[in-house]
Image (cartoon, rainbow, N blue to C red):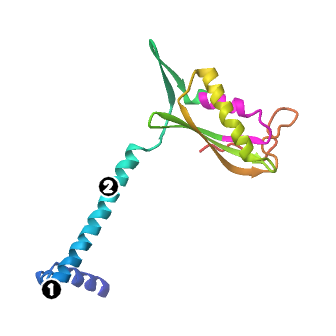
Amino acid sequence: MNLLASIADGWRTVCSAEFWRMLLSDDFNRGYFTALVLVILFLLLVLVVRIVFALIFRTRSCRAVTIEQEHGSFSVSAAAITGAAKQELEHIPGLEVRRIRLYRRSGKYILAIGCAFAAGTRCSEIALEIRPRLLEKFKEYFGIETIGEIRIAVEKISPGAGQRNDSGTDDSSVRFTGF
């Protein structure tokens, strides 16, 4: 109770006219107070601008890619795009695709791929191989040229990621868990 009383007493002091008269009594205090107010206003302005930019330029999850054509539009679902990507990537040894998401930012689409690589695999070389291959397939299959970026995230290095057994199933201990 003593803490609450001291906090209440502090607020009473700050809200009193005597406190403000003493604070603004000479030029130095007025200048210091003005600078303090300007810094607080500047920080609030930066916060508001950051929120506005975050709302305007945010990356949105996408359900379909729409392609404008001469006599209408053509829409390809995100499921079709991710299915084509998984089908294309399953043939790469040492790679297991764990998740694929399609996003949109400023009219361009972003394909985010989460992968598990087998131990000893050169991830950067495979990533360089994947990007042009997928862009070519999307253009070939669907006519999509608006995928501006393919992000590849290494989620796990596994001893047997992407290795197939005789029945064609994945032998690795890494499994797709969704989001």
Tell me what residue is drawn at x 26 percent, y 85 percent: 5
Residue extending furthest right? 166
Q: With 176 as the anchor, is 3 left or right in this view?
A: left
Q: Say whether disc 1 or disc 2 marks the residue closer to the N-terminus.
A: 1
Q: For the residue marked with disc 1, what is the amino acid?
A: Met
Mark count: 2
Q: Position of residue 12 (x, y in %)?
A: 18, 81
- Compared with 158, 148 (above or below) is above
Q: Residue at x 71, y 46 (%)?
A: 124
Q: What amino acid type is highlighted by mark number 2?
A: Val
Q: Nearer the viewer, residue 125 or 97?
A: 125
Residue 90, x across and y down, in percent? 74, 34
Q: Quadrant of residue 98?
A: top right
Q: In this orientation, which residue lies closer to the viewer: 11 or 116?
A: 116
Q: Residue at x 56, y 30 (%)?
A: 78
Q: Residue at x 26, y 64 (%)?
A: 41
Q: Is residue 161 left or right of residue 98?
A: right
Q: Which mark is residue 22?
A: 1
Circle 1 sits in a helix, a strand or a loop, which is it?
A: helix
Q: Give the SS element for disc 2.
A: helix
Residue 48: mark in rendering: 2
Magenta-drawn stretch contains 85: yes
Give the alpha-carbon distance from disc 1 to disc 2, as whole Å. Answer: 33 Å
What span is in magenta? Answer: 81-98
Question: Are there few (<14), some (14-19), or many (20+) residues within 10 Å of tag 1?
Answer: few
